[in-house]
Amino acid sequence: MSILFGLLLPFFGTTLGAASIFLMRRELKPLVQKSMLGFASGVMVAASIWSLLIPAIDMSEGMGKLAFVPAAAGFAIGIGFLLLLDHVVPHMHMDRQQEGPRVALKKTTMLVLAVTLHNIPEGICTGAVFAGILEGSEAVTMAGAFALSIGIAIQNFPEGAIISMPLKMEGIGKRKAFLYGTLSGIVEPIAAGLTLLFAAYVTPVLPYLLAFAAGAMMYVVVEELVPEASEGEHSNIGTIGFALGFLLMMILDVALG
């Protein structure tokens, strides 16, 4: 039951963020959005380092001086995977810039697709960490796994708000905007559950899988979150948000892990 709760925590974060639309009468102010994007970036970078890359290297210590190989290879594959998705799946960033094949889809659909795409690696990394626990890996602890889930849930809260608010401003009703925001996060527990389902097959490649998730998350941060948090005036707000998110995730991981 505790593992199921851990897998669902990130989805709860997205849902709560999307639900904030019922409490807000106006659109998110640029400064608030920048701080949220920066905060999410800090959480994802810290999670990638402490909860994914370092455990991946620790699991490979038997390789001696080549212990970095699984982490480096998985990281590169994760970057390449997200790069491929960015080119083959039509989607739209929060700044309304369209990427991928040109298709006749609504802006709202493409915005939801963008967030959904980036939630897949987060679900995989959550499932992979809990799979490591089930298989008795010494590099992963239950407290550390929950620290990662809590960190992703915290990061998903502003993400849920940031996607539901623009949908509302496009003329969609609050309930429908909330539904779209929530559905963008449903892919996380699905991806986590599938990863956990194949735990016995995942374990031999767990270091690669953890690093893969780290690479995919880093791609999202560098490609989208940081540029959107730093564009225009008051870019330092995004930087402060990044620092706070990084510090919080680092503290969570060290204190609980």
Image (cartoon, helix red, strand yellow):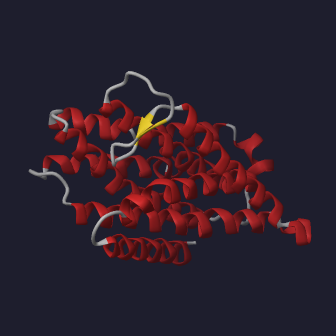
Q: Is residue 227 left or right of residue 95?
A: right
Vertical order, 68 against 11 (above or below): below
Using the image as rendered, state which of residue 227 and residue 8 is in the foreground. 227
Using the image as rendered, state which of residue 89 and residue 128 is in the foreground. 89
Q: Quadrant of residue 153?
A: bottom left
Is residue 135 visible to us here?
Answer: no
Q: Is residue 185 left or right of residue 215?
A: left
Q: Position of residue 31 (x, y in %)?
A: 24, 66
**Residue at coordinates 57% horizontally, 66% vertically from top-left?**
144
The single residue placed furthest to the left in the displayed view is 25
Number of disc labels:
0
Q: Is residue 241 left or right of residue 75?
A: left
Vertical order, 227 against 196 (above or below): below
Using the image as rendered, state which of residue 150 and residue 1 is in the foreground. 150
Using the image as rendered, state which of residue 92 and residue 51 is in the foreground. 92
**Residue at coordinates 27% horizontally, 69% vertically from top-left?**
233
**Residue at coordinates 38% horizontally, 33% vertically from top-left?**
110
- Quadrant for the C terminus in the image: bottom right
Q: Position of residue 76 (x, y in %)?
A: 71, 54
Q: Is residue 132 left or right of residue 97?
A: right
Q: Position of residue 149 (x, y in %)?
A: 49, 57
Is residue 147 visible to us here?
Answer: yes
**Residue at coordinates 36% horizontally, 76% vertically from top-left?**
240
Q: Position of residue 16 (x, y in %)?
A: 28, 50
